[in-house]
Each structure stands twice: as C-alpha cells, then as structure tokens.
Image (cartoon, rainbow, N blue to C red):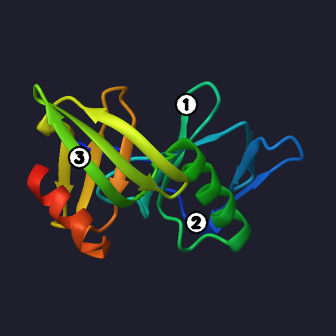
Amino acid sequence: MPDKPDIGLLDPRDVSVWRDTTRRLYARVGDREHEDIRAVWLFPVSRRAEYVSLVTDAGKEIGILPSLKALDSTSRKALEEELQRAYFVPQITRVIDVQERFGVSEWHVEIDRGPRTFEVRDREDIHTIGGSRVLITDADGNVLEIPDVARLDRASQLLVETLV
C-alpha cells in the first residue's frame, strides 16, 4: 500500500507570525524563519476560519494551518489582518434599489464603507451560500457580500429576494 501524501499540516503551537516595522509578514515554523510570507485561505467561501496556507514570496508552500484559533494572539491577529487585506470583500448593509435593463441589474446599495452603485451582468453572478449568505460578483469582477439577508431591513430583503 502506498504511503499517504504529506499535506503539510502545521501544528499551531510550532508557528509564530509577526510583522516587522515595514509591515512585511514573517513566520517561524519550528526553528526555521520565513520572511515576506503570504496567507491564503484554502476555502475562502465556505470555511474561512479553517485551513490557511502559509506561502513564501517565491510561491512555495510552507504548510497549512488547520485553524487560527490555536495560535498565540499576536500570530492570530497578524494573520487575520493579512487575510482581511488580501481578501477584502465589502459588506452590503442595505439595498436601496435594484433596476434591471436588458438583463443587466444596476444595484444601489450601502456598504460598510458608504454608498456604492454597481452592475451585475447575469443572475449566475449572484450566489446564495448556506441559505442566507449572498456573494455578488459585479461587472468589473469585484465581489460584494451580504453576510445574512435576514439581518437586512425588510425593503432590502424584498429587493434581494427578487434577484436570488
């Protein structure tokens, strides 16, 4: 029977992550230090709290953290900030209006950073995940998120329900 492949799971107790004064991300895994690393979610849509790959600046995988929860607080904070920066997804907090013309919908919304207008070319660019979370890819390829449709005001819910 062939050996199982080593998928490179890291023990969080052997990992520490920090930023230097120039904001570059470093990691120490065991006794080996890596500079200018990146953090990559392996399941960015469905399992954001789990399975984060640490990758060198040359693109070589250092290993996979099954969860950030067991890391020390400094390491966890540094990785959470890096992932938020790398995977910035605006959160829609209110849907003001949606108008459809020739199969293209124009959305007027409030996001967590203020008002925004964008177009969606196809209903296939609107994905419901887990029943109440919605990811929308606009005509420019940007992704926006409604974390929970049920938490929107009723008027916003009705507009979203007509398009989902």
Residue 92, picture quadrant: bottom left
How many dots with numbers? 3
Label number found at residue 98 = 3
Sequence-first tag of 3 and 1 = 1
- In the figure, is residue 67 to the left or right of 62? left
- The residue nearer to you, when weighing 66 against 139, is 139
Q: Are marks 2 and 1 in contact (CB under 8 Å)?
A: no
Label 1: state its secondary structure: loop
Q: Nearer the viewer, mark 3 or mark 2?
A: 3
Label 2: state its secondary structure: helix
- The residue nearer to you, when weighing 34 against 110, is 110
Label number found at residue 12 = 2
Label 3: state its secondary structure: strand
In space, the residues marked 3 and 1 are separated at their CA atoms by 44 Å
Counting from the top left corner in percent of width and height, residue 152 is at: 31, 70
- Give neighbour class at mark 1: few <14, some 14-19, many 20+ (Cα, 10 Å): few
Q: Are marks 3 and 1 in contact (CB under 8 Å)?
A: no
Would you place residue 145 above or below residue 25 in this image?
below
Sequence-first tag of 2 and 1 = 2
- Give neighbour class at mark 2: few <14, some 14-19, many 20+ (Cα, 10 Å): many
What amino acid does circle 1 point to? Lys
